[in-house]
Image: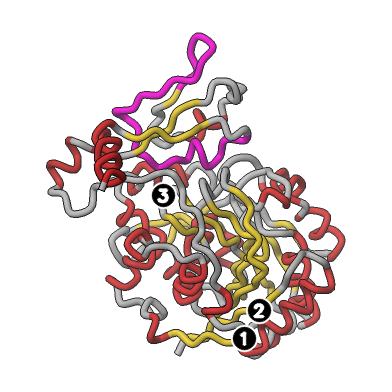
């Protein structure tokens, strides 16, 4: 059985968070079970973009502080690293409040700037992952529980996509991003190359709606932990009451028969799953009706059957972040406005994910609008 621990922590008060993490890890054997004296331990938070902690876009600095301190109390060296979707790791750490914590605790910030080629063992034959990620003695995964416009859920497995350095993320979106199942398979293959020794999820304040970068903070009051990232993602999705048909990583994990992908293999300790679950999370506006369609029809009708990004002119500052982040280069700024080349758009929604001004919204394709009207009339 794969143990998933759940602990109540109501707010990000320093002592409450650390005490909560200590209780959380007790069913797993405590931090000392995962960390040894003298080891270099990489802590991998969610450092998506340079937003303040209260926006719930990144892992909260007080959870990072608690984990760093517990690692150091075991006699280990604490490293903190990630490769943000846009901007430098130092800038994101500074804006999110993580940098002061790293400096105050004496931990080391290790930006993921150098990639190392790694052979894949599945659908994809080669990856390039950050050197600190591969060379650390131990890996602690510290994701934020959030909705995600492409994968529906971003938690443990998705957080490891940060091990892909900088612009390589765009290349992977271009290679696998047009097919959500294929993208989920890619995420799982990255996970299998270096499985975390420990996963701790920040769900004190999670994100619902148009996550992972433009959603709404939602107070949940929980911390979650497990050795097995897949099992923890399954439990997190049940807490958020997300429809299983939309959980692409979970479905692909079951197709691969990965440990932790079946609920019967999971044992929940601490707070019960029933007590941890509340109202269903509001899901991203993005939707489509491609399920079950033949490939030739799916490709031909893709633009009519999916949602697409659209600029909110009064919010857009023409900063160009979305243009530079777009994997298929389907966006440009011309004549003082943001323009889309929709036939080239792969619906990866990196533009919305990274927009610092929430200046992009979703618009349904014509056939998708019609289908929604028919469903609403029934």
Identify the residue shown where x is 31% and y is 73%: 254
The answer to whether residue 330 is above or below residue 20 is: above
Q: Which residue reaches farthest front?
A: 378
Mark 2 packing: few (<14 Cα in 10 Å), some, or many (20+)? many
Q: Could you tell whether 23 is left or right of 324 in the image?
A: right
Identify the residue shown where x is 38% and y is 86%: 264
Identify the residue shown where x is 84% and y is 73%: 15
- Mark 2 and mark 1 residues within 8 Å of each other at the beta carbon: yes
Tell me the mark number nearer the camera, choosing from 2 and 3.
2
User: Distance between the Cα atoms at labels 2 and 1?
Assistant: 6 Å
Which residue corresponds to mark 1? 270
The numbered mark at residue 168 is: none
Magenta span of residues: 332-356
Is residue 354 inside the magenta stretch? yes
- Tell which circle, 2 or 3, labels the residue nearer the N-terminal end: 2
Image spot of residue 82 (x, y percent)? 61, 55
Disc 1 element: strand
Image spot of residue 51 (x, y percent)? 69, 44
The numbered mark at residue 7 is: 2
Disc 3 element: loop
Mark 1 packing: few (<14 Cα in 10 Å), some, or many (20+)? some
Disc 2 element: strand
Q: Could you tell whether 246 is left or right of 241 in the image?
A: left
Which residue corresponds to mark 3? 150
Residue 318 found in image quarter? top right
Image spot of residue 137 (x, y percent)? 62, 75
Identify the residue shown where x is 73% and y is 66%: 63
């Amino acid at each position: 059985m794969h143990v998933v621990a759940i602990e109540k922590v109501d707010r990000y008060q320093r002592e409450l968070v650390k005490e909560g993490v200590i209780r959380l890890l007790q069913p797993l054997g405590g931090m000392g079970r995962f960390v040894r004296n003298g080891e270099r331990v990489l802590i991998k938070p969610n450092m998506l973009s340079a937003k303040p902690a209260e926006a719930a876009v990144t892992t909260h600095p007080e959870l990072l502080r608690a984990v760093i301190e517990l690692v150091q109390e075991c006699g280990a060296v604490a490293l903190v690293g990630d490769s943000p979707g846009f901007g430098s790791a130092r800038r994101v750490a500074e804006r999110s409040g993580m940098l002061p914590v790293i400096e105050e605790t004496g931990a080391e910030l290790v930006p993921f700037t150098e990639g190392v080629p790694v052979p894949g063992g599945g659908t994809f034959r080669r990856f390039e992952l950050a050197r600190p990620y591969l060379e650390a003695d131990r890996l602690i995964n510290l994701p934020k529980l959030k909705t995600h416009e492409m994968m529906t859920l971003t938690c443990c497995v998705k957080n490891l996509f940060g091990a892909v350095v900088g612009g390589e993320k765009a290349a992977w979106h271009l290679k696998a991003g047009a097919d959500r199942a294929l993208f989920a398979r890619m995420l799982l293959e990255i996970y299998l190359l270096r499985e975390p020794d420990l996963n701790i999820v920040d769900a004190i304040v999670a994100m619902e709606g148009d996550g992972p970068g433009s959603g709404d903070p939602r107070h949940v009051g929980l911390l979650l932990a497990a050795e097995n990232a897949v099992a923890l993602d399954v439990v997190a999705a049940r807490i958020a009451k997300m429809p299983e048909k939309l959980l692409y990583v979970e479905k692909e994990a079951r197709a691969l028969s990965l440990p932790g992908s079946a609920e019967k293999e999971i044992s929940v300790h601490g707070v019960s799953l029933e007590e941890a679950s509340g109202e269903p999370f509001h899901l991203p506006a993005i939707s489509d009706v491609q399920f079950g369609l033949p490939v030739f029809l799916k490709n031909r009708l893709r633009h009519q059957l999916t949602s697409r990004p659209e600029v909110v002119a009064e919010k857009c500052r023409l900063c160009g972040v979305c243009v530079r982040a777009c994997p298929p280069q389907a966006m440009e700024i011309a004549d003082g406005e943001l323009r889309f080349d929709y036939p080239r758009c792969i619906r990866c929604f990196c533009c919305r994910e990274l927009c610092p001004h929430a200046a992009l919204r979703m618009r349904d394709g014509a056939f998708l609008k019609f289908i929604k009207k028919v469903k609403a009339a029934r």
